[in-house]
Each structure stands twice: as structure tokens, then as C-alpha cells.
Image: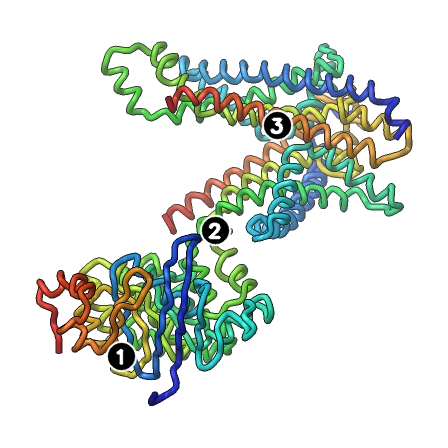
Amino acid sequence: MSSPAIIELRRVGKSYGSHRVLKGIDLRVQAGEIVALIGPSGSGKTTALRCMNFLERYDEGEVWINGQLLGYSGSGRRAEDQDGPGAIAEVRKPLAMVFQQFNLWPHMTVLENVMAPLLLGKRLKRDEARRIAEQTLARVGMAAKADAYPARLSGGQQQRVGIARALAVEPQLLLLDEPTSALDPELVEEVLNVIQGLARDGMTMVMVTHEMSFAAKVSSQVVFMEAGEVIERGAPAQLFRQPATERLQQFLKPWMQRGLEMH
Amino acid sequence: MMATFYDRLGLYAPALWQGAQVTLVLCLLAMALGFVIAVLLDGLGRSSSRGWVWCSRVYVSFFRGTPLLAQLLLCFYLPSALGVDVPGSVAAVMVLALNTAAYQAQILRSGFDAIAPGQLEAAAVFGLSRRQTLLQIQLPQVLRLTLPALVSEFIDVIKVSAVISVVAVTDLMRVGQQLVAQTYRPLEVYLVAALFYLALTSILALIGRILEKRWQERHG
Amino acid sequence: MNDFLTYLPDFAHALWTTLYISLAAAAMGAVVGFGLNTLRLWLPLCAWPCRVYVWLIRGTPFLAQLFVFYFGLPVLGVTLDAVTATVLALTLYSGAYFAELFRSAWNSVPKGQLEAARVHGIGGAQIFWHIQAPQALAFCLPLLGNQVILTIKESAVASIITVPELTQTAGQIVSNTYSYVVPYTLLVLSYWLLTQAVGLGAAWLAQRATRYQKG
């Protein structure tokens, strides 16, 4: 254990009624790591990601963020019930998220979208918030569109704004939920380039993605899930070249056939 | 007795205009108050507690299922039974507000439903409180979406407000009654009073149509 | 409470009056509205007078209209008693709303169906009865029930010209017994029961009517 984990999942489980979506997931993410969660649909990878910031309530196990238990108090009671909704917001502060459907607020301009978490969540002063927002927009290449409304932007542009919004709060860890799945193919690259830039700058990330070659290129750890369980995990070089399990081999077939690029 | 109709109109018009102003002001107040109540009602209707949901349903069913006049009489005389004297205009605004809230709650509900849940998730994830989410994210959008329907509801409020004349409010209708008592010309006076209402509702309807067109162009 | 029991017969009579006025006006108003809609479809020249009529009625409060009928008509030599004036005014009032209801129901039938009918030699009257009417009526059945409820609620206004319906009678009881709470509470509960009953009845009818559609 070289450095303390920013986020740690221990035996995390979740059920929807009688259907067990997560069956005891273990995961550790340390500073500087980039974790790619891959797997077929229904594998529970998105649910696992959403449990990390309590967008989904997990039923079993524990999620720890910087040594604090998320969503529940030590005695097992829901943190909401004991300490109020602010308790959850406090613990998940170091996290930010980029959504598959972007989830920008349509009645605000691009700049206002990026400033909102700073003004309302972090309660910064307006000038400070504006400065940071403009900087982050420049970083993702969207400075020119600061006064535009999301409806006028392409999908790729909207997602870059979404990334800027997440960056502006200066998170310790960035959660990305299939950031390019909702994009037309020709727009995927611009977003992947931005994410790659973040990786180069040392941003810690957990990313659910179907972009295998991108995952291979950028991540430091790949976790393959199927039917709510972690089947295999390891460095991308090893996992993609020599998948140990039958199921991962099956899953990677389409990409192998197309010639998965590895560095 | 004045010679021509137009002379008499010169007598009616200013008085009726005063009455119309009272009607407008009271209805605007009721509308605004009703809006706040409606937002609360919508919140109750989405509560996880079955009790609150039931409460909001009963409220809406009651205020939509009974005449405004009956509600007004109940709420105007009820305080008297408890020994509290409520002025007519206050009771009128209160009852109108409670009444329109039931209709506005239905209107706002579809507005709130139209906002993608992802936006609320993003708000939660980025540390916005429930209150901030309501005021900064939801309400601006809900208002834009439902404005034409709200204008339509405002027109209805103005029409039903005619009955508040029974609790001694000097609204447009009561001024009409006073003029009739003075001039003994009920047909003329009530027709002109009706025309005043018609003017109010028609102008508002026009505003509503313009607003609808503008929203369609901007966000269509 | 004992006092109130002696007024129960009056209350029952008032309930009957309210029902009689409302349902008569709603029924006749539906006929008026249907007639107006049919008229403007058949005689395009009648379209704009109908629109003016609908605009006048829907743009003004019922109370004002009632006052014109009850207080204003005598000036022209036509004196009506309170009940007749109410039924007349309420009929014309709901007639305009029914006309508007039928108009949008008829418009809801896709134009393509009408073109298909014309192209195959089906005449105007048959289009009206066999293609538009069945679909339009099925479409607006729940709204018709709602309009009946609106008519019942509007009938309360007649208490102002002392028609012995529910609201007026409740007021009488109040002034005789000097108690406000019980009579007025029972008043609103009576209306609530009425409108809920009509609402359920209309929903049941609508369900039966569309059952054959879903087959």
C-alpha cells in the first residue's frame, strides 16, 4: 500500500427488489490512478460507479472516501437519517462527476453552468468563481462559447462543458459514466482528447467506458465486471493482451478481431 | 339624468376602472400566493410519505370539486365563529389563492416532471442543497415551461373573482352593482361591466399567445 | 346539531334544485354547443358569429351574464323569475364551453382521414356522422363530464339572486341559526360529493365507451 486510497469499496452490494445488481465489489483507487471499469451491459459497472458518490444507495458493504464512510454512520444507520443530507454532501465533496447524458442545466449559459457549483456548492465569491470557470473552460477548449446556451452546442461540446464543470470544483477524483456513449462517432475523439489531457495532468479518475482502445491507452488499472461481480482486474497491458478468464476473452472478442491497439 | 349613453359612459367608466384595478390587484396577489402554495403542494405530492401525498390529493380534489363561492363563505365566516374579524378583501385573496393553488399545482406538476432527473443528479453531485436546486435549477425552467398555462389560469381567476363582491369587496362587479343602485339602468351598467371583464381577459389572452410564440421560437 | 336536522328537508330540496338547474342547463348547453359546432362546420358563414359568441361568454364571468339576464332583460320588457333566468343563462354559458370542447374534439381527427374519405366518394354528411363524430365523441367524453362538473359549481352563483339552491339555502340556515360552521361545512361537502359522483360516473361511462374501441 503505497499511498492511502481516495476511494475504497469493500464488499459493496446492491439489489433492486429481488435482483442483485452488485454482489460484493472490492475496489481501491489511489491518487494518480486511472481505473477503467469495463464489461457488458447489465454487469453493474455503472451502478458501482454511482454507488461511489451515493447516487445509488448501496445495501451491503462500505464505501470509504478519504477514510470517511459514505452514506451511513458507523453504527450502520443511514447518515441522512442521523446527520442530515449535508452529511453525504460533505463526505463526497472530493468527488466530481461527468455524466453520459451531460446533464447540463439548459436555462444557464455555459459559463453559468460551470460557475454554479462554485457559487452554490462551494459558496465562492462571484469574481473568484468566474475566474476559475473561465480558466477551466479554456482548458477544455470551450472558452469561446462561454455565453452560449447548451441547446446550441454539439454533443461533444456539451460534454466538454460537463468536464469543465467537474474540473472547476478541483476534485480529488473524477467519476466518468460512459462519457462518450451518447455522442455521434465523429464527436467522440474531441472528448477523449480532453480526458487524455486530464490523465496527463495527473487527474485521478474512475471511468466506465466502452472505448477499449482508449481504456487500454490511458488507464493504469482495468476492472472487468460481469453480472455484478469483478471477474478480472489488472494492468491494461496484461489484461488486454492475455485475458486470464474465459469470460473476459469472450467479452474482448469483437475488439480483438478489429485489432486492439496497445502501446 | 344625463342625456346620451356616452355621457353616462363617462360616469360609469372611471368608477368601473377603479373596480377593475381592485380586481386586478387582488387577483395578482392571489395568483402569486397561490403559486407559492402550489409549489409546496407539488412537493408534498412527491413526498415519500403516503400521508403527505394523500393530503395534497385531498386538497386538490376539494378545491377543484367545490364552488369558489362556497369556499369563500366557509372561509369568510369561519373566523367570525372563532371571534376573529377578517376584512373581506383579505378573505377574498386567501380563498382565491387557496383555490388557484389547486389548479396551479396540476400545471406546475407537468413542468417539474419535464425536467430530466439527470439535472437534479448533477445538482446533488455538485453540492447544491435542495433549496438551491429548487430555486436555481427547477423553478426557472418550470416557469418558462408553464407560463402560457399560468396566464390561462390567471384569466380564470379574474373570471371567478366576480363572486368576491358578496363579501363586500369593491371589485369590478360590486362597483357595477353600486352604479345600478344609483342609475337604475341595470342592462347598460352590467353590459359595460361585462365588457370591462372582456377587455381584461382578452388582453391577457393576447399576452399569453405572444408569450407562447416567443417561447416556441427561442426553445422550440 | 338538532337545529340542523330540522332544516334537513330544506337542504334536500335545495340539493334537488341545484341538480335540476345544473343538469338541465348542462344537457341543453351540450345540445347548444353541439348545434353551434355543427352549424359552423356546415355553414362557413356562421363560423365567425359562433366565434364571437364563444368569445363573449368565455371572456366574462358567469355572474355578470346572470345579472344581465335577471336584472337587465326587464328593461327590454322580458321579466324572468330567478330560476328561469338562471337556467337560461347557465345554458348559454355552458353552451359556449361545450361548443369549444366539440370544436377541438372535431379538430383532433386527423385531416388525412377526411381526405381519404372524400377521395373515395364519401359525402360531407357521412364524413361527419361516420368518421368524425365517433372518434371526436370518444375523445371528448371525459371532458364532457368535466364540463358538467363546472356547470354544477357555477350554479352556486345563482344564490346571489336568491335562487333556493344549495348555497342560498345554507345561507338561510346560517342566518336562522346563527351558526356558521356546520351549515357551510355541510355545504362544501355536498358539492364535493356531487362533483366526485359525477366525475366517477363520467369515468365509468368513458371506460365503457372505449372498451369497444380497444376490443
Mark 3, Cα crowd under 10 Å, few <14 / some 14-19 / many 20+, is many
Label 2: which residue? Answer: B144
Residue at screen point 22% across, 78% down: A235
Label 1: which residue? Answer: A199
Residue type at mark 1: give it.
Ala
Which of A222/B82 is in front?
A222
In this orientation, does residue A131 appear? yes
Numbered label attached to residue A129: none
Mark 2, Cα crowd under 10 Å, few <14 / some 14-19 / many 20+, is some
Is B56 placed above or below C91 here? below
x and y percentages locating residue B62 in the rendered image: 66, 37
* Quadrant position of residue B180: top right
Is A143 placed above or below B71 here? below
Numbered label attached to residue C150: 3
* Quadrant position of residue A38: bottom left
For this view, does A26 lie left or right of residue C61?
Answer: left
> Which quadrant, please, contains the N terminus of chain A?
bottom left
